[in-house]
Amino acid sequence: MEEEADKFGYKVLYGSTEDNLTKARGLLEVLEYRQVDGYIITPTPNLDKEIEILKNSRKPMVLMDRYLPQIPTNYVMVNNFQGAYDAAEYLLGLGYRKIAYVTTTSEQIQMKERMNGFTAAMKAHGAAFPRKMVKKIPFSVSKDEAVSQIMEFMKSVPGLDAIFFATNYLGVFGIESIKDLGWKIGEDVALISFDDHDLFRLHTPGITCVSQPIHEIAQNLVQVLMNELNQHQHQINQVVLPATLVKRESCRKRTKTPAV
């Protein structure tokens, strides 16, 4: 985004909310005090009021990664439903049937759409996907606690042969969990994560993932914002980009009995 904004002569002030509502509100106050020209926001849960205030005051704004269904706004995001659907369909095509799903406790729209896409693919192919195959982990827990929870969950699923992680940081925790269990990725259990990560590319075996088009997302975010800034447009622009399944060695055609 910094590279794209620089093409138009704008600088980016950056702050992380860590998915925390209080931090998000504080950052918005600081940015308003700095009299910024426009906002690119990844909204935290319950930030609806602040987003609505910005919208009503006609501040140039675009949301990224997710949107608020009840507030019509500009946004740029990936097709989360399609990405998760493709991941489930790919695993099923390789012969996996006992597929677990690890996600966060977040009820935000992008996480719901990933769950809905995965569930729809399982249903479309007649694959069982009971509630016990889903594990939700709070964003606030420590890495060690998350790894421990994932390990216990995987051990609790008889015949588990594949696992999908709904975010890349959970995927990283999953790699550690599988290693601690003494299982082999791609042999004892297949692994796919939503979002790519440098570790996934460098890991042996490489980790299959649903990749988001980072540069295209940035280009669209800045372009939508520039349209509002320079042309005073208030027409809503909602951009949904396709996700890409990147196939690596963590998912192979199923040939052996899974770890138990």
Image: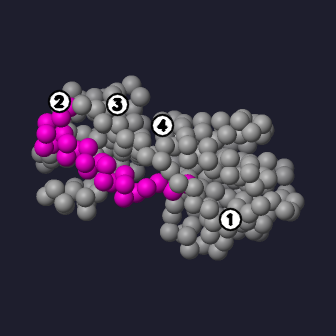
Residue position marked by numbered label 4 in the rendering = 108
Q: Which numbered tag is attached to residue 57?
A: 2
Mark 3, other Cα within 10 Å: few <14 / some 14–19 / many ≥20 = some
* Mark in the foreground, 2 or 1: 1
Q: Give the range drawn in magenta.
A: 210-234
Closer to the camera in the image, 106 or 100? 100
Does residue 27 show up magenta in the picture? no
| Numbered disc 3: secondary structure | helix
Does residue 214 show up magenta in the picture? yes
Going 30% across and 54% down the picture, which residue do you hit?
A: 219
Sequence-earlier tag: 3 or 2? 3
Q: In which quarter of the image is residue 75?
A: top left
Which quadrant would the C terminus be assigned to in this image?
bottom right
Say whether residue 39 is visible: no
Structural distance between the alpha carbons of marks 3 and 1: 39 Å
Give, as a three-letter code, the residue at label 2: Ser
Q: Quadrant of residue 249?
A: bottom right
Vertical placement of residue 46 versus 19, above or below? above
Going 62% across and 62% down the picture, which residue do you hit?
A: 247
Give, as a three-letter code, the residue at label 3: Asp
Residue 193 horizontal/vertical position (percent): 59, 56
| Numbered disc 2: secondary structure | loop
Sequence-earlier tag: 1 or 4? 4
Sequence-earlier tag: 2 or 4? 2
Q: Quadrant of residue 50?
A: top left
Magenta part, dominant SS: helix
Sequence-earlier tag: 3 or 1? 3
